[in-house]
């Protein structure tokens, strides 16, 4: 028979890759076993199983898995094999990887001109598949190709080529075999250096390039216990042979006896007792899933299941067993809308099962991750909102961690065909698909576009990140040397807080995990014990300590020096106009503008020299909004590189009389960002995100109020988000807005709607 060399080349891929390229060799090892069982003499050279294999940063956006190209080709053995099989994978379809694959094919032709060169994807399922054909063979420089499963088709192709026969087609296809997989040999682990692969996995884990939902720390092995899926979701690439018109079994599994044999082999010969199970849908057959759990319990295995299970095919007994066998459970819900889940995606799913499983996981102490998808064809904004709201409710109610991705059409899928037939693409991408799932939507919907989808996901994930309280805001005093027309605490008596009680409060919050602290007022520099508070916060271990001030005290250089060197990590100065007339009409204090400007000029260079972050706050009013662009130029002239643009909130002395039209003001804010955004980092606060189309990123810091607890001078303790939410409401336009999951809507001014306010809050 033939001598065959199988090659797993190094993988050059985008840092935002999908799936699990560290296990790209799994299908190749399976093909090697099938070739050997057919009587061929087989060698394997695997770039992921070399002594120095690891994760290498190629460029800012690209990484390499394995070893450098030059090192790989230097390891090619002698003499020339009859057939060289290069393992294909979706990651090699990307343009950077294809360029290196083309280079490898040229090198192989030159080194062994008499050898047959075959490109074979050796598909065993469990990861995405991208269609290809003769055009790719021509582009890459390969003579022959083998698509889909390689267990039968590849040995037959190799035998033909070795015998000097010419196959009927340049690309042969491998349909699935019998219902059971027991006729197949186990992967040819003995033909590669498994210890080197384990070290490779360890280096990838230590690189912490990407947060996976499973631990890559060795020893571990990727294992397939079944192939295929009986469902046909529109985005899924499972059973690619089926979409190509081939007949066969949609789902096949290994018997309990072979699973037992596999477990013994990996444990006894290689010391592997942790399986990363890459089945497309491991719990589709309850008997098979229970048998797998039996094997794991019998052999003391730990299991990871990166591909989401179906919640509607899980039982509580299985969840209880999983809680003992694996660190987390991953389930795929996709959508919270029956129409989208079942009619558009084709999932045929009981939506109530997700919450049911979440409850079981909470009861049994099993961490739960739920996969969600937004941006399906014909999906509306209202349906996207329902999915995101459900994801949030399950997180808040059960601790079910949501993972949201964009519906991404992969070549060969029903979703891809739908997007093409209905002309839904905004930017078609069939090769470099990795960055699309999390970062770059490419479809348009009935009432949304890619920018909208990106904003919905970004807003949702920001709320998720901000969910745990982290920041304490301390009103050190209500005393102030300004009298701002919009002051949120301006209707309170002038007195300093109890410093000892405030320090005790800081200690209590620090013990609860809070690590950020903000001192404001009133005007905090009027409090004679301010620096004592700052020192206490740093001594308690607060990592970031901010001071917000009107800057007037810092007009004296010695005061600026004291403030900057007091222990703070950031300093914010409130400047409410580009000139004396505008600023002082807002702050109602003669001479305030000159002092604040002097304070900025004294403090900012000191901050730069000492590593203290410096920025300014501006609160928009009817007076300063028209001159906002002049304000931006002043900040540039002062060397300011951070600006918080704040809209009014209906508290304290603020009233609707002061408030500019939010829509008009938002347009000016976006112009401000356009004109000065290359020099100044802007954050927009207290504005509903719908006012910032295309600029939502600048308003996300507002969601950070979820993390903040405010302590008033009176020692009242409130969550800032909840406090402000009491004066916000969702309007009719919010009903279908997906950002309403994290945006609390429009501020409510009692002096505008007194009757409604009285009904809501009383007199």
Image (tube, grey):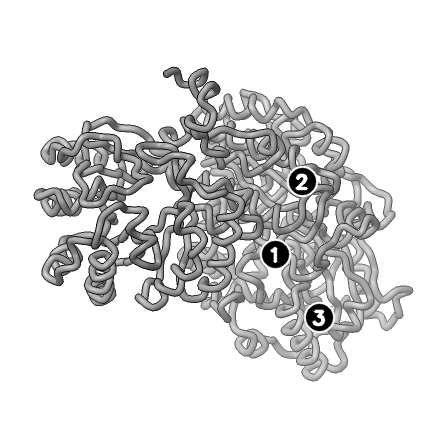
Quadrant containing the C terminus is top left
Residue named by callout 2? 226
Residue 84, numbered circle: 3
Query: Nearer the observer, disc 2 or disc 1?
Result: 1
Residue 681 occupies quadrant:
bottom left
Q: Are marks 1 and 3 in contact (CB under 8 Å)?
A: no
Residue 668 visible in the shown view: yes
Residue 723 occupies quadrant:
top left
Residue at 41%, 43% in the rendered image: 647
Residue 179 occupies quadrant:
top right
Residue named by callout 1? 434
Residue 275 visible in the shown view: no
Query: Which residue of the protein is positioned furthest toward the bottom in this rendering?
Result: 110
First in residue order: circle 1 vs circle 3: 3
SS at circle 3: strand
Query: Nearer the observer, disc 1 or disc 3?
Result: 1
As measured in the structure, the alpha-carbon distance from the residue carrying label 3 to the one carrying label 2 is: 28 Å
As measured in the structure, the alpha-carbon distance from the residue carrying label 1 to the one carrying label 3 is: 28 Å
Check disc 3: other Cα within 10 Å, few if <14, some if 14-19, many if 20+: many
Q: Are marks 3 and 2 in contact (CB under 8 Å)?
A: no
Judge by depth and name the residue closer to the eye, 469 or 227: 469
Decide if residue 698 is on the left or right side of residue 351. left
Q: Is residue 313 above or below residue 477?
A: above
């Amino acid at each position: 028979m033939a001598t065959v060399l199988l090659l797993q080349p190094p993988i050059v891929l985008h840092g935002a890759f999908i799936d699990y390229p560290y296990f790209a060799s799994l299908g190749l090892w399976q093909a090697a076993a099938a070739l050997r069982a057919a009587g061929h003499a087989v060698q394997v050279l695997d770039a992921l199983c070399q002594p120095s294999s690891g994760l290498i940063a190629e460029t800012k956006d690209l990484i390499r898995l394995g070893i450098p190209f030059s090192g790989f080709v230097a390891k090619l053995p002698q003499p020339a094999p009859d057939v060289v099989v290069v393992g294909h994978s979706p990651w090699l379809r990307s343009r950077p990887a294809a360029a290196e694959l083309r280079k490898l094919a040229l090198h192989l032709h030159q080194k062994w001109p008499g050898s047959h060169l075959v490109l074979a994807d050796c598909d065993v399922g469990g990861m995405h598949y991208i269609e290809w054909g003769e055009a790719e063979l021509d582009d890459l420089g390969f003579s022959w190709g083998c698509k889909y499963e390689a267990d039968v088709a590849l040995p037959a192709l190799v035998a033909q080529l070795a015998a000097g026969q010419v196959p009927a087609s340049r690309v042969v296809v491998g349909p699935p075999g019998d219902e059971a997989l027991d006729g197949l040999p186990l992967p040819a682990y003995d033909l590669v250096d498994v210890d080197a692969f384990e070290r490779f996995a360890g280096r990838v884990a230590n690189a912490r390039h990407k947060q996976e939902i499973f631990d890559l720390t060795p020893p571990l092995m990727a294992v397939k216990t079944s192939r295929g899926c009986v469902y046909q979701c529109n985005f899924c690439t499972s059973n690619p042979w089926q979409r190509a018109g081939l007949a066969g079994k949609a789902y096949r599994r290994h018997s309990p006896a072979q699973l037992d044999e596999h477990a013994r082999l990996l444990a006894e010969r290689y010391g592997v007792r942790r399986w990363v199970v890459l089945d497309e849908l491991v719990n589709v057959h309850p008997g098979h899933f229970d048998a797998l759990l039996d094997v794991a319990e019998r052999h003391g295995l730990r299991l990871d299941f990166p591909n989401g299970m179906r919640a509607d095919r899980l039982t509580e007994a299985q969840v209880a067993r999983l809680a003992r066998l694996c660190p987390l459970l991953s389930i795929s819900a996709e959508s919270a809308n029956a129409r989208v889940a079942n009619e558009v995606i084709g999932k045929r799913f009981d939506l109530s099962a997700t919450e049911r499983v979440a409850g079981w996981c909470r009861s049994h102490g099993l961490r739960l991750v739920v996969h969600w998808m937004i941006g399906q064809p014909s999906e509306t904004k209202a349906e996207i909102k329902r999915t995101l709201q459900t994801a949030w409710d399950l997180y808040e109610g059960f601790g079910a961690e949501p993972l949201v991705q964009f519906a991404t059409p992969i070549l060969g899928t029903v979703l891809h065909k739908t997007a093409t037939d209905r002309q839904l693409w905004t930017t078609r991408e069939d090769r470099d698909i990795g960055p699309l799932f999390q970062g770059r939507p490419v479809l348009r919907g009935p009432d949304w576009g890619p920018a909208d989808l990106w904003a919905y996901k970004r807003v949702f994930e920001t709320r998720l990140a901000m969910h745990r309280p982290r920041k304490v805001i301390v009103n050190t005093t209500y005393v102030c040397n300004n009298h701002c027309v919009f002051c949120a605490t301006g209707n309170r008596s002038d007195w300093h807080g109890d410093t000892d009680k405030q320090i005790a409060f800081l200690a209590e919050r620090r013990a609860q995990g809070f690590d950020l602290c903000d001192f404001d007022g009133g005007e905090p520099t009027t409090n004679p014990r301010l620096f004592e508070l700052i020192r206490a916060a740093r001594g308690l271990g607060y990592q970031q300590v901010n001071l917000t001030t009107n800057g007037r005290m810092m007009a004296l250089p010695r005061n600026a020096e004291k403030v900057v060197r007091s222990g703070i990590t950031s300093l914010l100065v409130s400047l409410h106009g580009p000139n004396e007339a505008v600023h002082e009409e807002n702050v109602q204090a003669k001479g305030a503008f000159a002092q604040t400007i002097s304070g900025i000029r004294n403090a900012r260079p000191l901050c730069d020299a000492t590593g203290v972050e410096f920025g300014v706050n501006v609160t928009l009013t009817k007076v300063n909004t028209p001159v906002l662009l002049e304000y931006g130029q002043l900040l540039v002239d002062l060397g300011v590189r951070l600006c918080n643009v704040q809209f009014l909130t209906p508290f304290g002395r603020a009233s609707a009389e002061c408030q500019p039209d939010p829509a008009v003001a938002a347009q000016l804010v976006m112009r401000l960002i356009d004109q000065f955004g290359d020099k100044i980092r802007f954050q927009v606060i207290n504005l509903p995100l719908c006012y910032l189309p295309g600029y939502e990123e600048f308003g996300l810091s507002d969601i950070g109020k979820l993390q903040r607890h405010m302590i008033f001078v009176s020692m009242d303790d409130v969550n800032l988000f909840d406090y402000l939410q009491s004066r916000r409401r969702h309007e009719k336009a919010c009903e279908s807005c997906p950002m309403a999951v994290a945006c609390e809507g429009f501020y409510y001014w009692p002096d505008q709607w007194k009757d409604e306010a009285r009904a809501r809050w009383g007199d």
